[in-house]
Image (spheres, coloured by chain):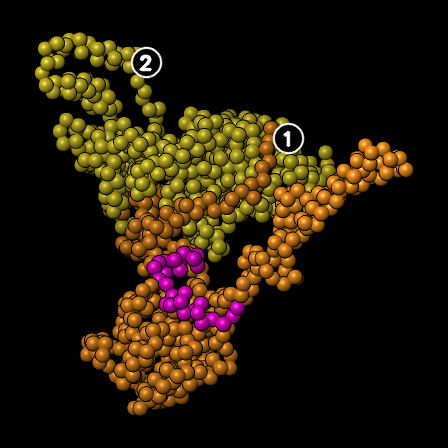
Amino acid sequence: MSELLFTGGEWDFALLKRVFAAIEDVGLNDLKLDVYPNQIEIIASEQMLDAYSAHGMPLMYHHWSFGKIFAREETMYQKGYSGLAYEIVINSNPCIAYLMEENTMTMQALVMAHACFGHNHFFKNNYLFRQWTNAEAILDYLAFAKKYIAACEEKYGVEQVEAVLDSAHAIMEQGVFRYRRPPRPSQAQREERLRKRQKYEEESFNDLWRTLPGTARDMSADLAAVDEGEVVGSQAAMNLPEENLIYFLEKHSPVMKNWQREILRIVRNVAQYFYPQMQTKVMNEGCATFVHHYIMNALYDRGQISEGSILEFLHSHSSVVMQPGFDDSRYYGINPYALGFAMMSDIKRMSEDPTPEDRDWFPDVAGKGNWRDVLKHAWANYRDESFIQQFLSPKVMRDLKLFAVRDKTEDPVYTVAAIHNEAGYRKLRTSLARLYDLATHQPDIQVVGANLAGDRTLTLRHNRHRGIPLAQNTKDAVLKHIRRLWGYNVVLEEPEG
Amino acid sequence: MTNFIDRRLNPKGKSLANRQRFIRRARGEIKEAVQKSLKDRTVSDFAKDQKISIPTKSTKEPRFRHDPTVGGEHERVLPGNKDFIEGDQIKKPRQGEGQGRGKDAAQGGEAEDDFSFTLSQDEILDIFFEDLELPNLVKTSLKEVKVLSWRRAGLRTSGSPNQVNLVRTMRNSFGRRLAMRRPKEDEIEVLREKLLMLRRDAGSDTDPEKKQHILELEEEIAKMEYRRKWVPFLDPVDVRFNAFVHEPVPTSRAVMFCLMDVSGSMGEREKDLAKRFFMLLHLFLKRRYERLDIVFIRHTHDAQEVDEHTFFYSRQSGGTIVSTALEEMQKIVHERYATGEWNIYAAQASDGYTQTGDASRCVDLLNQELMPMCQYYAYIEILDEREMEVFSSEESGAELWRAYRTVAKDWKNFATKRIAKPQDIFPVFRELFAKDGAEAKA
């Protein structure tokens, strides 16, 4: 058991396989992780830049905004302002992980542990991913999307397609279902509709009408009205209020052609696919970081990697989980790697070596020695908001020296609302958890009315979060995009309070 | 089951299509930015990869965003507390200075800064030279260059023996022999063998039948041998020679002379305008030639070759004698740039003043010495705007201008232009090098 797997920084495919097997052994047999099969792809740095620009996906339709990201990343990289990520991992089955050619063997091991076991386990088990994403189908779907959009560009022109994509991207954040799947007419409902149609036809049948010019059209219009009564006519049938703007426009926009609706659908599906990742940044990265930290240390304890290698690992690990203070020039918000890793490590600590405080706060964890189960339960059943609310311990708050600042627009000062002390722990924890609720930074905008009988005005409502209004300049620009998709006037209400 | 896949050899540049779309979309802004950046670059390194910033106007991606500065309340959690305690109050930065500049503003609202990225050399140049073409390039440069080289040009039927193309020759020969049914050596040998046997068998036997047979065989062999002679193994019609043609190659080297008056009358503004013009010319030539030298010649009443920095930034006082610069140029050409191997371009910038009588000397020099060896000579007269109005007609102008107009009449590749402000440069440049400029002037 105690043979070094590798000594230098060089790697080759045979070595990668051996190291992967050792990592797999720790991951599956010690941590008891449950993962999709892995597919590990070695790529060069330019390819990493390519992968960056399209949400990290290996396939993506063409759009200038991806080119913009690419141009920026390329500049940052070439000028040395930022390094490249060591890896990209895709929530698919098999789980695809990209490793950079330039990494040393130690880094490849770190990355494999991080991506192929940490992220992979999280993707496969977390309820949000299970519920909302389809790991089996995503690559096929993206291949379809790319082909479909390319075909549309061919047929209708790049500008036309670009216009729809621009508008759809503008409301991408409002293009996800947060609470429910899209409603689908059940078989019974469909039969009912058919029956109604027939009934109407029978009832209104009069052979004389056939002889009058122009009546055929009238009749079909009437029939359409019957159908519309079901799907587009009444407010109730449109399922208002509707939180998913793209879905609503796709189904009910009076002006769009079918291909445009299909493009909206593609954008909506991509948005929905990424939505869980946005809600689980801390947990996902924390999980991956915790797993790679555990696995690398386990390999070192087993004598499978050298001291030089573990030091190289620790150096890069500690820069990943570094959290600069708020007054540091490097401060860029709370580092999800740092917070997630600190919380998960603390769960392990409490489980093995509890203090009286831990027994008070976490009676189910402290001293029970069951950290593997606790973590796996958390990874499977929580998102950032609930995880922090449930598991942020006083020790982590003290270590990170967290404090909450309240900002009321009309006050001339910020007020420190809570700090890391006995009186503040709970308040602080709730504040932080709220920050990870997407509603705090993604405006909650819903369709509340569509006047199809009259002037076809579409009414949206912004439900203010703690009274915060929308930024005026972007609001107008986005509304212009919605108007383009809807085809008629669009108003946005912002009731106070 | 774990798969390892080596994707390093897969095509790179998957994002190219996206990048091109982005550049197309931001074309207007990129163009402006590139032209603005002209000022800060040296003549020769302008065309390198370059970071540019463009306003985000056409590439904005608006999203609904909260704006907490307008109303409502929110709470932030920050790490790294040092001495705050609950209830502490921190003064807000004044409106407009703090908000949006701090880094965590990036969380809340999209920063409205310019968007910076790197344009590659090709992209920069494409933006510049959308529909420009070097003047007379095809006509003049190909006609005048003296360097010739041999180039393979297929096959021909005559040539010197060392250029015989064996493969083709033998192929032809083989085909001809097949078509003409040339008997093979082996076939004749078989018959001869047969004849020999018959003769030995026959001995002194005078069986007429056998004799007849022998005679027939002899006849046949003679026929075949005759045929072999008649259809030779190698006929002159088979022979093919590799053909080479002697053709001129355009020289891949060019030298660009920048001539400028640096006397007191040329101020910062004039020099800046001149620099921009030189830059553009340099860019243009850089694209055409593998190797491009630049020679800077400045002059007052006396001319000398200087480096770029001195050329643009150092001051020298004195009178103005333009012909000295032309003489200096002529000297340098003779010393270093033999016309057969170098394409010579010259650009002269001046405010149009020279010592009385010097203009005719310049004209003589140009007509007799310089123009015959130059691919192109551009004279740029930098005026101030008031002068521009006074000299609104092409015909009127200072002495040098009028003198140069006579040169322009004789030489198609001599151009004169006047500019007064930066905006004039690009149109002027386009006009000078416009695809059909030569025809228009002629």
User: Is B361 or A297 nearer to us in this picture?
Assistant: B361
Residue at mark 1: chain: A
Colour chain A is painted in:
yellow
SS at mark 1 in the image: helix
Residue at image coords 25%, 36%: A485
* Chain B representation colour: orange
Q: Position of residue A425 (x, y in %)?
A: 42, 37
Mark 1 = which residue? A25
Quarter holding the N terminus of chain B?
top right
Q: How many marks?
A: 2
Q: Which residue is mark 2?
A: A187
Identify the amino acid type marked 1.
Answer: Asp
- Taking the spot 36% from the left edge, 73% from the top edge, the residue there is B413
Q: Spatial distance from mark 1 to mark 2, Cα to Cα?
A: 48 Å
Helix or strand or loop: what does disc 2 sit on? helix
Q: Is residue B367 left or right of residue A1?
A: left
Q: Is residue B135 magenta?
A: yes
Q: Give the magenta-colored segment's residue range.
A: B120-148
Nearer-the-camera pick, A397 or B198: B198
Q: What crowding class fits label 2: few (fewer than 14 Cα within 10 Å), some (14-19), or many (20 or more)? A: few
Picture coordinates of residue A144, whole percent (x, y): 41, 31
